[in-house]
Amino acid sequence: MMIEQAKPMRRRWLLIASLALNLVVIGVAVGAAWRYAGHDKARLRMPPVGALLFRDLDAGTRQSLRSKAEGDHGSYHARRRAEGARVVELLRATPFEAAALGEMLNAQAERRHSFQRSVQEAWLGKIEAMSAEERADYADRLQHRVDHPKRRKWRE
Protein backbone atom coordinates (compact mmCIF):
# COMPACT_ATOMS: atom_id res chain seq x y z
CA MET A 1 0.00 0.00 0.00
CA MET A 2 2.88 2.43 0.73
CA ILE A 3 4.42 1.77 -2.69
CA GLU A 4 1.17 2.64 -4.45
CA GLN A 5 0.99 6.04 -2.66
CA ALA A 6 4.64 6.91 -3.39
CA LYS A 7 4.24 6.61 -7.19
CA PRO A 8 1.57 9.35 -7.58
CA MET A 9 3.59 11.67 -5.29
CA ARG A 10 6.76 11.11 -7.34
CA ARG A 11 4.85 11.69 -10.57
CA ARG A 12 3.43 14.94 -9.22
CA TRP A 13 6.96 16.23 -8.36
CA LEU A 14 8.25 15.14 -11.74
CA LEU A 15 5.43 17.04 -13.42
CA ILE A 16 6.12 20.17 -11.32
CA ALA A 17 9.87 20.00 -12.05
CA SER A 18 9.22 19.52 -15.76
CA LEU A 19 6.85 22.49 -15.89
CA ALA A 20 9.33 24.68 -13.99
CA LEU A 21 12.12 23.76 -16.39
CA ASN A 22 9.89 24.48 -19.37
CA LEU A 23 9.04 27.91 -17.95
CA VAL A 24 12.73 28.70 -17.47
CA VAL A 25 13.53 27.71 -21.08
CA ILE A 26 10.60 29.74 -22.40
CA GLY A 27 11.67 32.74 -20.29
CA VAL A 28 15.22 32.60 -21.63
CA ALA A 29 13.96 32.30 -25.21
CA VAL A 30 11.51 35.20 -24.84
CA GLY A 31 14.17 37.36 -23.15
CA ALA A 32 16.67 36.68 -25.92
CA ALA A 33 14.09 37.39 -28.60
CA TRP A 34 13.13 40.65 -26.88
CA ARG A 35 16.74 41.78 -26.54
CA TYR A 36 17.85 40.96 -30.07
CA ALA A 37 14.65 42.15 -31.77
CA GLY A 38 15.61 45.78 -31.26
CA HIS A 39 13.76 46.44 -28.01
CA ASP A 40 16.95 47.19 -26.07
CA LYS A 41 16.62 50.98 -26.29
CA ALA A 42 19.67 51.62 -24.09
CA ARG A 43 21.88 50.36 -26.92
CA LEU A 44 20.49 52.99 -29.32
CA ARG A 45 22.23 55.89 -27.61
CA MET A 46 24.09 58.54 -29.49
CA PRO A 47 27.82 57.74 -29.43
CA PRO A 48 30.11 60.36 -27.92
CA VAL A 49 31.14 63.10 -30.34
CA GLY A 50 34.78 62.02 -30.00
CA ALA A 51 33.86 58.55 -31.21
CA LEU A 52 32.05 60.02 -34.22
CA LEU A 53 35.09 62.12 -35.10
CA PHE A 54 37.49 59.20 -34.67
CA ARG A 55 35.41 56.89 -36.88
CA ASP A 56 35.37 59.51 -39.62
CA LEU A 57 39.16 59.56 -39.91
CA ASP A 58 40.82 57.36 -42.52
CA ALA A 59 42.08 53.94 -41.37
CA GLY A 60 45.75 54.93 -41.52
CA THR A 61 45.24 57.97 -39.32
CA ARG A 62 43.16 55.98 -36.83
CA GLN A 63 45.86 53.30 -36.63
CA SER A 64 48.58 55.90 -36.15
CA LEU A 65 46.64 57.60 -33.33
CA ARG A 66 45.91 54.24 -31.69
CA SER A 67 49.57 53.20 -31.84
CA LYS A 68 50.61 56.46 -30.23
CA ALA A 69 48.01 56.01 -27.46
CA GLU A 70 48.92 52.36 -26.85
CA GLY A 71 52.53 53.23 -26.15
CA ASP A 72 54.79 50.33 -25.22
CA HIS A 73 51.87 48.03 -24.39
CA GLY A 74 51.13 46.98 -27.98
CA SER A 75 47.36 47.39 -27.71
CA TYR A 76 44.79 49.63 -26.09
CA HIS A 77 43.41 46.73 -24.05
CA ALA A 78 46.88 45.71 -22.85
CA ARG A 79 47.52 49.28 -21.73
CA ARG A 80 44.18 49.35 -19.89
CA ARG A 81 44.97 46.03 -18.17
CA ALA A 82 48.40 47.33 -17.15
CA GLU A 83 46.85 50.50 -15.73
CA GLY A 84 44.26 48.46 -13.83
CA ALA A 85 46.97 46.18 -12.44
CA ARG A 86 48.95 49.24 -11.34
CA VAL A 87 45.91 50.67 -9.51
CA VAL A 88 45.41 47.36 -7.69
CA GLU A 89 49.11 47.23 -6.83
CA LEU A 90 49.01 50.76 -5.41
CA LEU A 91 45.85 50.00 -3.41
CA ARG A 92 47.49 46.95 -1.82
CA ALA A 93 50.80 48.68 -1.06
CA THR A 94 51.86 48.94 2.55
CA PRO A 95 52.20 51.66 3.49
CA PHE A 96 49.52 53.08 1.23
CA GLU A 97 50.76 56.05 -0.80
CA ALA A 98 47.79 58.16 -1.88
CA ALA A 99 50.11 60.58 -3.71
CA ALA A 100 51.47 57.77 -5.92
CA LEU A 101 47.94 56.64 -6.77
CA GLY A 102 46.92 60.24 -7.50
CA GLU A 103 49.92 60.72 -9.80
CA MET A 104 49.10 57.52 -11.67
CA LEU A 105 45.47 58.61 -12.14
CA ASN A 106 46.55 62.09 -13.26
CA ALA A 107 48.97 60.58 -15.80
CA GLN A 108 46.17 58.35 -17.12
CA ALA A 109 43.84 61.36 -17.45
CA GLU A 110 46.54 63.31 -19.28
CA ARG A 111 47.08 60.42 -21.75
CA ARG A 112 43.32 60.32 -22.43
CA HIS A 113 43.22 64.08 -22.92
CA SER A 114 46.27 63.98 -25.20
CA PHE A 115 44.64 61.27 -27.33
CA GLN A 116 41.43 63.29 -27.57
CA ARG A 117 43.37 66.39 -28.63
CA SER A 118 45.25 64.43 -31.32
CA VAL A 119 41.95 63.04 -32.69
CA GLN A 120 40.44 66.52 -32.75
CA GLU A 121 43.47 67.98 -34.53
CA ALA A 122 43.48 65.21 -37.16
CA TRP A 123 39.73 65.57 -37.70
CA LEU A 124 39.91 69.35 -37.92
CA GLY A 125 42.70 69.03 -40.50
CA LYS A 126 40.44 66.78 -42.56
CA ILE A 127 37.57 69.27 -42.29
CA GLU A 128 39.77 72.24 -43.20
CA ALA A 129 40.79 70.46 -46.41
CA MET A 130 37.15 70.15 -47.53
CA SER A 131 35.38 72.53 -49.85
CA ALA A 132 32.24 74.31 -48.62
CA GLU A 133 30.10 71.80 -50.53
CA GLU A 134 31.96 68.81 -49.08
CA ARG A 135 31.59 70.25 -45.56
CA ALA A 136 27.85 70.74 -46.09
CA ASP A 137 27.48 67.14 -47.33
CA TYR A 138 29.53 65.90 -44.38
CA ALA A 139 27.39 67.95 -41.98
CA ASP A 140 24.25 66.35 -43.45
CA ARG A 141 25.69 62.84 -42.96
CA LEU A 142 26.76 63.66 -39.42
CA GLN A 143 23.33 65.11 -38.63
CA HIS A 144 21.71 61.90 -39.88
CA ARG A 145 23.97 59.81 -37.61
CA VAL A 146 23.11 62.04 -34.66
CA ASP A 147 19.37 61.82 -35.37
CA HIS A 148 19.35 58.07 -36.16
CA PRO A 149 21.88 56.25 -33.98
CA LYS A 150 22.60 52.66 -34.90
CA ARG A 151 22.97 49.80 -32.51
CA ARG A 152 26.20 50.13 -30.60
CA LYS A 153 29.00 48.01 -31.91
CA TRP A 154 31.19 47.03 -29.02
CA ARG A 155 34.28 46.44 -31.13
CA GLU A 156 35.14 48.09 -34.38
Image (cartoon, helix red, strand yellow):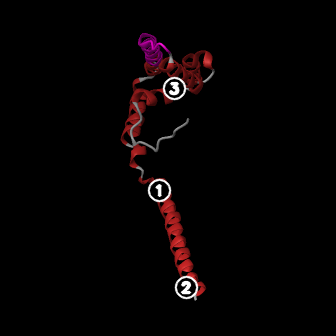
Q: Which residues are magenta?
A: 94-114
Residue at the spot of label 3: 57
Which numbered circle lies on residue 37?
1
Q: Looking at the picture, how far across and down is residue 126, in whole percent?
A: 47, 21
Q: Residue furthest front?
A: 2
Look at the image and tell me whether residue 15 can be seen. yes
Label 3 secondary element = loop
Label located before the other in sequence (1 or 2): 2
Q: Residue at x 37, y 36 (%)?
A: 143
Q: Observer-nearest residue: 134 or 39?
A: 39
Instruction: Decide: is 21 above or below 130.
Output: below
Kind of residue at badge 3: Leu
Kind of residue at badge 2: Gln
Which numbered circle lies on residue 5?
2
Kind of residue at badge 1: Ala
Q: Which one is in front in this view, the residue at disc 3 or the one at disc 2?
A: 2
| Residue 37 highlighted magenta (yes or no) | no
